[in-house]
Each structure stands twice: as C-alpha cells, then as structure tokens.
Amino acid sequence: MSQNLGQQLIAWRRELHQFPELSNEEFATTERIQGWLRSAGIEPQPYGLNTGVVAEIGQGDALIALRADIDALPIEEVVPVEFRSQNPGVMHACGHDVHTSVILGAALLLKAREKTLPGRVRLLFQPAEERFGGAKTLIKAGALDNVSAIFGMHNAPELPVGTFATRGGPFYANVDRFDFEVTGKGAHAARPQEGIDAIVIASQIVTALQTLVSRSYSPLESVVVSVTRIEGGNTWNVLPQTVVLEGTVRTHNDAIRASLPQRFQQLISSIAEGFGATAKLNWHAGPPALVNTERWAEFSKGVAAEAGYHVQHADLQMGGEDFAFYLHNTPGTFVSIGSASEFGLHHPGFKPDESLIEPAARYFSQLAEAALREIS
C-alpha cells in the first residue's frame, strides 16, 4: 500500500499543479478534491462554500481539524516539467498543491482506521489563503465549530526533506498593507521653485519610515517596514503633482502592530506639511501574527520524532499565513516540513521535492489520531 499511496498522492499533486486556480476561483480544484474524497468513501459536508471543501472522518465527541490550502498564485511557471501549469500566468508557486495532496493522503489513512479512531477528524481544504480571506470564510461558515485543536503545515524549501520544524508561541508575523498618496504641486522640471516636489517629499518619507524600526521600537522586537512600490510622473521634464507609495508592515507584537497606523500618519503628515504638501494614508489590516499553542507545538514535535523526522526548533518567520485566524479561535499548531527546492516560495522556478508528500501524509494521520486520544 505504501508504494501505491505515494504514487497516488504524487499523481493528484501533479494534476492539481497542471490546473492551478487563483484565490476564490478554485472551482475545478474543489470538484477534483470532492471527487477524490468520494472515491475513498468520504462525503464532503454542506457548508455553503463557493470554493473549498470540508469533510469529516470518524465518530464521537472528540473533534480535531486538519487544514490544507488550495489556491495558486498569478505567476508564470518556468519549471521544465511535463506537468507544468496549463493555465497561463497561474502557478502553484507556494506548494498548496503539495499541502492538499498531503491532507488527502492523511484522509485516506484515517478512513482506513475510521472504526478505531477515538473521535472525529474534520478536513478543511481552504480557498484563498494567498488573499488572506479563506480562513475567515471557513470560520464564518462554521467549519471550526466544536473543534478542540487544529493543525496545518507549510512546505519549507530551505529545509531538507525529512526535516520538521515548529515552535510554540509567535511563529509567523502579521501582514498589514499600507498605501499613501503625497500631493504637492506640479511644475516644469526646469523651474522647481514654482512647484512642490512630491518626488522629493516621497523620498524623504521612505527614508524616515525606517526610523520607526530603528529608533521607535526596541531592537529586540521583530518589526519590518518595507516600501515596495513608488509611482509618480509620466515624463522626464515635469515634476508630478502626486506620488503614490505602497508597502507592508510585519511584526509579532500585537501592541506594536496596533500603534503603527497612527505612527505612520504622524510621520508622513509631518514631513509632507513641512514641505507644504499633504499625505493621505490608507491602512489595510491582514492576518494577525500566527501564535502556536505551546502545548500542541510540543505535542506535534513529539509525534514528528516518532514518525522519523529530524525535528528542529523553528526560527521566527516574517512571512504571513492566514492559518493565524484559526489559532485566534482554536488551540493548535502550524508546522514546517522540508521540501528542498532550489528556488523559494513565490518564485517561478519553485520545485518542491515530491518525496515529502507520503511521509507528511502519514505524519498528519498519526498526529490526528494521537491528538484525539490526548483530548479524549
């Protein structure tokens, strides 16, 4: 069965990889997952979702959840494999096809042991992780109701296959996005004294924003402010009236996160006003910091060691993950499993090692059963 299971999961992964779909557009992906579950005798449950699948295995009051994400990214694939993406400009460049195959494998293994399970395992195949909305959609639909613990994974291209890492407490950072517009006064580039140079002002603001990290918060805290887009002007000899800037802020500290919008507005407004301009800030709050439950993080490490993984204590991550929304509602843990890709996540050359899939599926089936026994 081991060889057959591994081959089946890789085949499913490759089919998902060939036909990736963007967030909230995972209609064919949803149909595939539903069909594969039904072929194993696992009936999807009616949660009123447009995309995504929820199913359950087992019986009894004890209930835990396993989550996989199913959406892809707007990236053109360059990996020279026969199962490369057939959808132009869309690619599973984050490995959600791998995550889905892992949890499908865990479902098959759990179904085979259903009569002896000491409770129920709810399977969440979640849409729209990349747009940070899918977890909230499933929570609102009731998919987390009565769940005592939830577990999920991300492949880690920087780790070798066979390596497992997690940590209790803060793990991934929050993901907030900002944009603001600096409005000055346009002028001929040869007569700058007649205008208010929005480009110079925006440049001053970009530099000053870094002082929020270096001078406003403790160097022992993890805070990142990155301006990722600056746009202004449309020709070489005219000073534009407006410049638009966009970027992201990451931290693991809720108090720092809460203080940043006001600090941003104070800083950009003061600089702009000093030059006779204005600056309008828009703040877009994303997922909070992902905070693993200490108890379940240690528990998951123990099961991983028993499953044969080389277990490491994970470093803090500045990336974001909407699994954080689940953990703000329910105890649980999120883990990293090595995928040994030369290129990292969100890269058009991302190529995870498929040999991670079957061992990870077996790990999650063991984890689910052990967690049920722990809570019951």
Image (tube, rainbow, N blue to C red):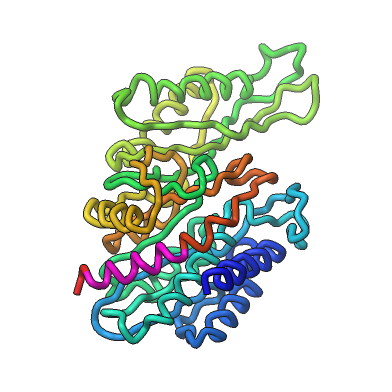
Say which residue appears at 63% left-offset and 51% top-offset: 93
Give residue 143's quadrant in the image.
bottom left
Say which residue appears at 54% left-offset and 62% top-offset: 128
Q: Viewed as shown, does residue 337 lie left or right of 343? A: left
User: From the viewer's perspective, is residue 239 above or below residue 365?
Assistant: above
User: From the viewer's perspective, is residue 106 above or below residue 256?
Assistant: below
Could you tell me if residue 261 is visible in this image?
no
Q: Position of residue 322 (x, y in %)?
A: 44, 55
Residues 192 and 344: in front is 344
Asked if residue 42 lies in the magenta stretch, the reply is: no
Give residue 181's quadrant in the image.
top right
What secondary structure prevails in the magenta region? helix
Asked if residue 372 lies in the magenta stretch, the reply is: yes
Residues 195 and 166: in front is 166
Q: Viewed as shown, does residue 140 lie left or right of 332? A: right
Q: Viewed as shown, does residue 61 lie left or right of 311? A: left
Could you tell me if residue 140 is visible in this image?
yes
Residue extent of the magenta highlight: 361-373
Q: Position of residue 303 (x, y in %)?
A: 31, 58
User: From the viewer's perspective, is residue 58 above or below residue 128?
Assistant: below
Give residue 253's quadrant in the image.
top left
Q: Position of residue 272 (x, y in %)?
A: 51, 24
Q: Position of residue 6 (x, y in %)?
A: 57, 67
User: From the viewer's perspective, is residue 226 above or below residue 208?
Assistant: below
The C terminus lies in quadrant: bottom left
Say which residue appears at 24% left-offset and 82% top-offset: 61
Say which residue appears at 52% left-offset and 75% top-offset: 1
Q: How many marks?
A: 0
Residues 35 and 227: in front is 35
